């Protein structure tokens, strides 16, 4: 009776169909993604045109967040819901209604700040809009009383969201150190946390819209270094925040002016 071929051996045979250079690239990219997404389900699909390794929180291919897509002319990183991701740096390729991809010349491309931001945004988008936990988070934000009535542990979710937010802040700090400053120093953030609050508010807490809004404010901060006096960028940020809060008040509440007649 012939011995059953294991999944690992099948995967090796699929990769072995490519030229040596692409084999090394596929293995390196796969190792990087497995390290970054250690709990994800790894889904492998091979046909005549494409060899695909998907990374999904479930066993359903439709839930995959990113995939490695390889064919004879190269290797790419595919975002299953890439059409919903903002791409101010023009990194994403493709014109379909759902999928976008990035060409990978080396595994180090995954560590570029723009690609890191896209991967993080794709993961957060899935958590917020395709998972039960994301539904709980949005319900707590919209109506804490309803969330409590539904049996959702509000305190636990607040702590988990704070931990996730701290991890994303650490990722941003790593990008700042490795891509801009190139050295460790005591104070690398001149008020970026406060700018982040304005960015999140302006994006209406949407992880996808956060990317172009963050780029807008990044340009504002950089341009502010050339503006005199130096406090003008912060003044502009304050005006934007004030206008956002005022607009929310006007949208949520009806302002009505009444003239009180003189008492007889």
Image (tube, grey):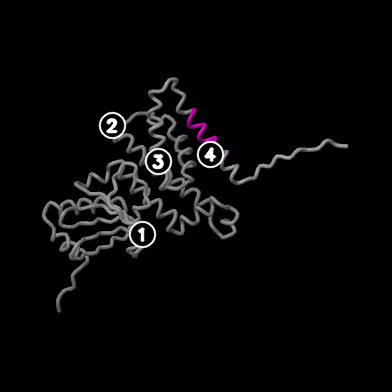
Residue 213 included in the magenta stretch of the image: no
In x, y percent, where is residue 193? 45, 35
Q: What mark, if any, has residue 82 been given in the picture?
A: none
Residues 238 and 166: in front is 238
Q: Nearer the viewer, mark 4 or mark 3?
A: 4
Disc 2, SS: loop
Closer to the chain start, of discs 3 and 1, is 1
In x, y percent, where is residue 101? 27, 52
Residue denoted by label 4:
244
Disc 3, SS: helix
Closer to the chain start, of discs 3 and 2, is 3
Q: Residue furthest right?
A: 264
3D distance between C-alphas at marks 4 and 3? 23 Å
Task: Determine whether, in the image, residue 186 is placed left or right of residue 204.
Answer: left
Figure check: 8 above or below 155? below
Residue denoted by label 3:
169
Q: Residue furthest left?
A: 20
Residue denoted by label 2:
182
Q: What mark, if any, has residue 57 been given in the picture?
A: 1
3D distance between C-alphas at marks 1 and 4? 35 Å
Disc 1, SS: loop
Closer to the chain start, of discs 1 and 4, is 1
Figure check: 19 above or below 5? above
Task: Name the quarter where the N terminus is drawn.
Answer: bottom left
Looking at the image, can residue 39 be seen? no
Q: Which residues are magenta?
A: 235-245
């Amino acid at each position: 009776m012939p011995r059953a071929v294991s999944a690992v051996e099948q995967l090796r045979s699929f990769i072995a169909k490519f030229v040596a250079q692409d084999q090394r690239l596929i293995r390196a990219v796969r190792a990087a993604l497995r390290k970054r997404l250690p709990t994800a389900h790894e889904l492998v699909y091979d046909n005549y045109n494409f060899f695909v390794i998907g990374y999904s929180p479930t066993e359903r291919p439709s839930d995959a967040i990113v995939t490695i897509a390889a064919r004879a002319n190269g290797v790419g990183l595919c975002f299953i819901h890439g059409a919903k991701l903002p791409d101010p740096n023009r990194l994403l390729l493709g014109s379909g209604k759902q999928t976008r991809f990035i060409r990978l010349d080396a595994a180090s491309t995954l560590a570029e700040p723009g690609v890191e931001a896209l991967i993080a945004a794709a993961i957060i988008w899935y958590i917020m809009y395709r998972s039960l936990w994301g539904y709980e988070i949005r319900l707590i934000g919209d109506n804490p009383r309803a969330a409590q009535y539904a049996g959702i542990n509000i305190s636990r979710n607040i702590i988990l969201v704070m931990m996730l937010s701290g991890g994303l802040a650490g990722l941003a700090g790593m990008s700042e150190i490795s891509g801009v400053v190139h050295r460790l120093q005591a104070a690398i953030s001149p008020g970026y946390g406060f700018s982040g609050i304005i960015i999140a508010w302006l994006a209406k807490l949407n992880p996808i819209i956060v990317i172009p809004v963050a780029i807008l404010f990044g340009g504002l901060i950089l341009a502010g270094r050339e503006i005199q006096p130096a406090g003008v960028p912060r003044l502009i940020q304050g005006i934007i925040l004030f206008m956002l809060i005022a607009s929310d008040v006007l949208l949520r509440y009806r302002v009505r002016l009444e003239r009180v007649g003189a008492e007889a």
